[in-house]
Image (cartoon, helix red, strand yellow):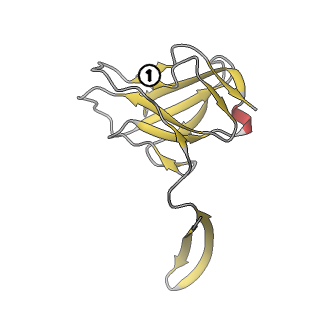
Amino acid sequence: MKLLKICLIATIGLSLISMKCKEEDPTGPEVIKCSGTCPDVSEITVLCPNGGETYSVGDYVQVQFCIPDNWPYNQARLFFSNNGGIDWIEIGTEGESDGYPVDIPNNTYTWKITSEYAGSECFIRATDYDATVQDFSDAPFVINE
């Protein structure tokens, strides 16, 4: 496997302040894709995971949501709960988050599942930026250690 070296360089004027590099597989990780397609919707809608799925720590999962054609927002936010919706952790925003952006044109987010996400009462919540419009997974899904 050939790795791609990516470096982030910070400067002030011509002076180097810091440089951080990481190597990545340019083909990217294997992603568990959503098999659904977005129907016509009037509000933001979670398509997958939407309940009944089982994932494992280390998986890369495609979170997919649908938005109406007249969606007035230029951002979406994604949240995750592993305790039935009592507590929520943000997993994606329109900018960079966990190295993957929320892709509004394709309504997808590639999410790397790490050990803190394990649980049997997992849900995804998709919202507009201010969380005034939102939808949740219809039923829980599972993330195994």
Nearest the viewer among 84 and 75 is 84
**Picture coordinates of residue 121, whole percent (x, y):** 67, 18
Q: Which residue is drawn at 55% across and 46% down?
A: 30
Q: Which residue is drawn at 43% across and 34% down?
A: 129
**Picture coordinates of residue 96, whole percent (x, y):** 50, 50
Residue 107 is drawn in which quadrant? top left
Q: Which residue lies furthest to the front in this view?
A: 1
Numbered disc 1: secondary structure = strand
Residue tagged 1: 134
Q: Is residue 109 left or right of residue 140?
A: left
Quarter of the image containing the C terminus? top right
Residue 73 is drawn in which quadrant? top left
Would you place residue 131 above or below residue 23 in this image? above
Q: Which residue lies furthest to the bottom in this view?
A: 14
Q: Is residue 145 left or right of residue 124?
A: right
Three-letter code, disc 1: Gln
Q: Is residue 123 visible?
A: yes
Quarter of the image containing the N terminus? bottom right
Would you place residue 23 above or below residue 142 in this image? below
